[in-house]
Amino acid sequence: MAGHDLAPHELRIIVAVEQARSFSGAAAALGLTQSAVSHSVRGTEKKIGAVLFERGRGGAAPTPAGERAVAHARRVLRLLETLAAEARGAADEGRDAVTGPLRVAAFRSAALHLLPAALAGLRARHPGVEPEVRVVRELGRGTAGEVADGRADLGIATLGTTSPVPRGLVGDVLVEEPYAFVHPAGHPDPRSLPLVDWAENCTSYTRDWWARQDWLPRATTRTEDDGAVLAMVSAGHAMAVMPALSLTGAPPSVTVTDLGPGRPTRSVGYVTTPELAATHVVRALIRELRAVAAEAAVSNSRKPEYL
């Protein structure tokens, strides 16, 4: 029934409350009174038929229903924004004009070594695109969670049998990056060094491969990200097993050794929502990402030695 439809301003209010974790914070962000925000949220809850926020002295915490509603609200608001951008583009430049904002979430090595070339190609072909990139740790729900929650239009994510495209999203693999043994160049016995690792490094599939390698000890050092791992190896303090993206531009002080035909690989791809997958701007970025992957721009610049 039309009387139960939610208006865009109601969606913006529940998004603001979730972000601020309080009615007063949402009111300040939106330029409204706290009573107006409270009244709107109560009306929204009545229309939906569920409590969206737990009220208390500590503020307003979203309930499970609230988390789901806010995720959908962000996605609906983004579609309304896309509707306007594509309609304006079609009116001004033609039917297939690509213009407007584009929000991308990517894990660190993809943001450094895969995304820049794709965005450069995108901006060269479509100057009206306004990309915004957020680096997100590929842990838990990772970049795919940013897309599912409406915070990103497209995510560069690790995909595979143990971490498929999440339910409700669409996506595909862009590149399969092999893992390699990384150690200080010229070290007489690199396998004697401590093994260094970081939390985002491996899926359970890769961990299983590690467990079968008698020559690989348990990691005794963990760092914040792959850049810190590479720095430790370069300084001669450790060895590591790392994927190709993380090894792009590795310094000469590091030797990259191929692990052979049984080596593990990591699938890097994109995820987006079914509705955004049909938009001109997301489709254009996917084309650029595929072109970069096809040109092997993410492979290690130096041919590895063999183990």
Image (cartoon, helix red, strand yellow):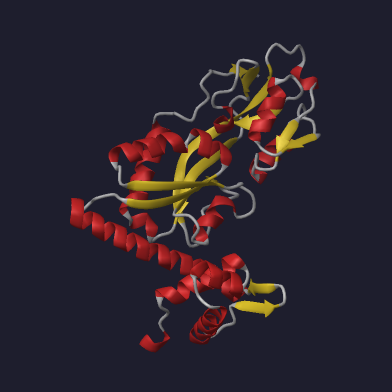
Quadrant the N terminus occupies: bottom left
**Numbered circles on residues, count:** 0
Is 64 on the left-hand or right-hand side of 14?
Answer: right
Identified at 63% across, 20% down, the residue is: 257
- Image location (x, y in percent) of residue 107: 56, 43
Asked whether residue 240 is in view, the answer is yes
Q: Residue at x 59, y 82 (%)?
A: 51
The quarter in which the C terminus is drawn is: top right
Q: Is residue 124 above or below residue 276?
A: above
Q: Residue at x 37, y 50 (%)?
A: 282
265 lies above or below 260: below
Q: Nearer the viewer, residue 184 or 34?
A: 34
Quarter occupied by residue 203 = top right
Q: Position of residue 283 (x, y in %)?
A: 34, 49
From the viewer's perspective, is 83 left or right of 264? left
Residue 146 in the image: x percent, y percent?
A: 53, 56
Residue 56, horizontal then vertical, whole percent: 70, 78
Front in this rendered view, residue 28 or 118: 28
Residue at 65% over, 39% down? 201
Using the image, determine if residue 155 lies above or below residue 259. Answer: below
Residue 68 visible in this rendered orientation of the protein: no
Instruction: Give the quarter of the image for residue 135.
Output: top right
